Amino acid sequence: MTLLVQSSCSYLYKRLLIGGVPPVCYKSSMPHVLSPSKITAWMACEHYLTLKFRADESARRRGFGNSDQSKTNEEIKTSADGDLVISPPKDFSDLLQKKGILHELECLKRYQEEYSNQGVVFEVDQADWQGGESFKGWTDRVGDPNPLEVGYPVIFQMPFIHNGIRGIADFLKEKGGTYEPVDSKLSRTGAKPGHLLQLLFYAEAVEANPAISERPEEVHVDLGSGESQSFKVSKFWWYWKHLRQKLEKVVEIGGKAETEPKKCSFCGMCEFRNKCFSEWKEKDSLILLSGSHSTHREALEEAGITTLRGLAELPKRTLQVLLDEQESNASEFFMSLDMEEEIEADFCQVMPEVNDGVFQDVKPDLKIRHLIRLWKQARLQLIAREKNLAIKDCPVHLFSKTEMIEKMEGRQGWKKGETLLHLPERSDYDIYLDFEGHPFLTAKEGIIFLFGYLEKVNGEWVYVSRWSHDVVTGNPSKDREKEEARNLVRFFHQRWKESKENGADMHVYHYNHTERSLMAELTTDTSHASHIVDIFGQLFGAEVSSEDLSDRKLLDELIENGVFVDLLATVRNSLQAGLESYSLKLMEQLAGFDREHDEEASENFQVVGDLVSSEISGSQEVSDGSGAVLRYELYANHKLYGQERDESHLDEIAKYNKEDVDATQALHKWLLKMRSESEHLSNEVAKLSADPEISIGGWVTKRIDNLKDEILKRVSA
Ligand code: SF4
């Protein structure tokens, strides 16, 4: 069987990247055609649509239909064994797109099985993009005869053009004389607002179809989890109508709209990200100020501070007055406006015109402590930029001891220890840990496919990789993943006990909290009963040997005793650097760590900060997490791509993962060096103050309390 499925550059824009001309029922005064995906993107960022309209206008001037001429058809074949075969993904977004298509086909299969007694599920003949067919031409061809009029129980991939919007409904299910639209989405946790809007458009188009003339009652989303979510159209109709009116105005203004690029969660996936980054660079936007949130930027902009330079230029005197006003004796903590002498001298050198003794009457509506941190960050980034410093030479400002203590205010137990003050010294028992995960190994499940770490064996640091697949078959499984996580916890616990017996220390270092959180997830018994039995068993004094403790309990014990150390949290609570982001890729360079292959990728990261990951392809070395995902996809799902299993993918992933754990170790060493060289910090590891929550067994008390709360809530509900 050969099935042609419409495809394009990005899964997110799957229905957006299709060429076409104005449709029959398209308002002739409307200069642009929208798609549901474009509308979804517009809801996240108004500027996106402005740029899209401008790109369309420019394409038309150059004689193209619009800017979306990169359409292709994805060919899916069936192998001799009956398995689907698809071309290998070129990059991460291509991978996501393919996963979306496969999920769509899974749903199609389900409908074919479900409706086998009621006649065929009608599969709309695909558009011939390569042959130059337009969307309008395709819609006309599909509409003759109109599949909605024929009365199929289910219609797959029905194209619509209606009132200036066009799109392709994954499925239409006949119900009560009309058709209810269904979209298949990779999301597992639930439909997103954009999904619902797409469906409301299809509902409107179905109602407008002369063969139907009736609004469907419900729309549905077939989630990646295998579950289906339904929405009453009547509940959301007003919103759709309101949105449509707004959109008509937006379309009329088109590319002339005076919108601004604003950083949002959509930027990392946006086709215009490079353009917007260039604009932010050029305008010296506060968006590139590390640690600034949109609320910070709004407050600064309202006060007339619109650039990073503008913030850095604020004289110290202004900050001092604001600090005195807001905090007159209110805080027991002292916050200094000064940074290290060398940094102060560098700032005077790059900004000699700034007179710190002058008062400038500016009052951003921000907490003074936040303002001071952002102001220092701006000065650090400005020094790095004006002096054109390499990342390794960027200025670093250490917080004072009181600032670090203040940052730990209100924290409990081990969480009080996430600063340089408490960073443990190195030990031969230490572990440096990093996981690699694939979010969409299948539509239903993601997986942590590699647990990589460094440990010292016979005096040598050794890299260990534990994989979540069978070594013989190469097949990954969730059982295997869980088993590896549990083995790792037992290994850590055993090593920790051994270190204590030998009067030594042992810690597990990682960058970001994800490793710790994922281990907690993977070692949590799904059976709540076992927890209750364990906990109440202990409560009533039952003897519980360590063998009886579940792996989750072992992990809890390690966590509560501060064995896991998140170096990202330590960095954030201890210092500021002249970097646009505090990602490991930048911090490791500051620590003097050189990746073997990664110079180009590192440069990209400095340019784009933590917003965009560089593109990768199967032929390149793995240079970031998405590259590792792509390699593992090719390894684990090789049959899907018509390939032999290739062990070299695992070597490349392990090489990349090893560099991450090496970098984590280098960062630990560097942080310790910073502490020992600092004049105001003690080189001794500060002891955490006594706290009942961190005593051994404290975790049991805490979980019993949680459980009691839960039971009481349910009883009184
Ligand atoms: S990169 Fe971000 S700001 Fe720019 S258009 Fe895309 S979503 Fe909008």
Image (cartoon, helix red, strand yellow):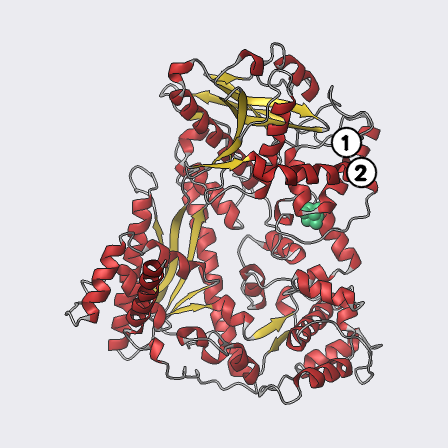
The picture places residue 413, in percent across and down from the top left corner, at 40, 76
Marking on residue 511: none
The picture places residue 501, in percent across and down from the top left corner, at 24, 77
Residue closest to the far left: 543
Above or below 386: residue 68: above
The picture places residue 254, in percent across and down from the top left corner, at 80, 38
Residue closest to the far top: 145
> Is residue 457 in sight in this rendering?
no
131 and 302: which one is in front? 302
> Is residue 447 in sight in this rendering?
yes
Marking on residue 254: 2
Q: Do the residues labelled 1 and 2 touch (CB within 8 Å)?
A: yes
CA separation, marks 1 and 2? 7 Å
| Residue position marked by numbered label 1 in the rendering | 32
The picture places residue 446, in percent across and down from the top left corner, at 42, 44
The number of numbered discs placed on residues in the rendered structure image is 2
**Horizontal relation, residue 104 to residue 49: left or right:** left
Residue in the picture at 32% in, 59% down: 715
218 and 472: which one is in front? 218
What secondary structure is found at the residue carrying circle 1?
Answer: loop
Is the CB of the residue bearing disc 2 within 8 angstroms of ligand 1? no
Above or below 114: residue 558: below
In the picture, residue 525 is in which quadrant? bottom left
